[in-house]
Amino acid sequence: MSDSPILFYSRGTPDPLTLEWVVEPGLLRFHWEGGAGDAAEGVELGVLPFKIARYLDAGELSHLRLQPGRIFTTIPEDGDWRAIAGRLRRDLYEVLTDRPEGWPTGDLPVESPQDASDAELAQAVEELIAGSAGNYASTHGGRMALRSVKDGVVKVHMSGACTNCPAAKQTLSSHIEMQLKHRFKNLKAVLPD
């Protein structure tokens, strides 16, 4: 089990039956999808833990799609998010944090965060700016915006109360760089722009 908190939250989609779960980069590194009839195969492959497969088997979820950094869960037409959302969130979080390397990969090919591209790193930085890092800056009257990612060097524009703030570099270090450096080996630095 991980000792530090991870980036993990849900957000709505255009389909009210589907929730998207945003997952910290590196904890979910492959593609898989299926419905109730595919749950046993997912368990057999070693990519679908039983505690998640049971949602499909019980008909509480009609579809599950896994991709790097994202989990899409869909309930049936007659389903009710209020009945399962809290329990599902807990079970997904436990699966993601139960092992240091994240969600079990079984025998499926995985996308290694060690070989991540600048585009994947930029996506992870955008998630942090849209979430915890951006929220932290906004509590001080500041804003962050990703300017560029090139050869592992991330540049973030700091505005509002963060403009010329002496703590801007420390904020970027603790709220972006420290969150990503253990997952992205190609990350060299996060700098104010």
Image (tube, rainbow, N blue to C red):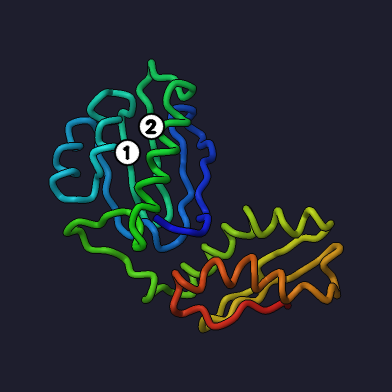
Amino acid type of the residue tagged 1 in the rendering:
Leu
Number of numbered tags placed on the structure image: 2
Q: Residue at x 22, y 63 (%)?
A: 109
**Residue 149 screen position, x and y as percent:** 57, 76
Q: Residues within 10 Å of mark 2 (few under 14, many from 20)?
A: many
Amino acid type of the residue tagged 2 in the rendering:
Thr
Q: Residue at x 14, y 42 (%)?
A: 41
Q: Residue at x 35, y 57 (%)?
A: 102
61 vs 18, left or right, is left
Q: Quadrant of residue 115?
A: bottom left
Q: Residue at x 47, y 31 (%)?
A: 86
111 vs 108, left or right, is right
Which residue corresponds to mark 1? 64
**Residue 193 screen position, x and y as percent:** 73, 78
Q: Which mark is residue 40?
A: none
**Residue 21 screen position, x and y as percent:** 46, 44
140 vs 109, left or right, is right
Marks 2/1 in contact by CB < 8 Å: the verdict is yes
The correct choice, above or below, for 84 with respect to 121 in the image is above
Q: Which mark is residue 74?
A: 2
The correct choice, above or below, for 158 with respect to 72 in the image is below
Of the pair 171 and 115, the residue shown nearer to us = 171
Secondary-structure class at tag 2: strand
Between the C-alphas of marks 2 and 1, the distance is 6 Å
The correct choice, above or below, for 47 with respect to 125 in the image is above
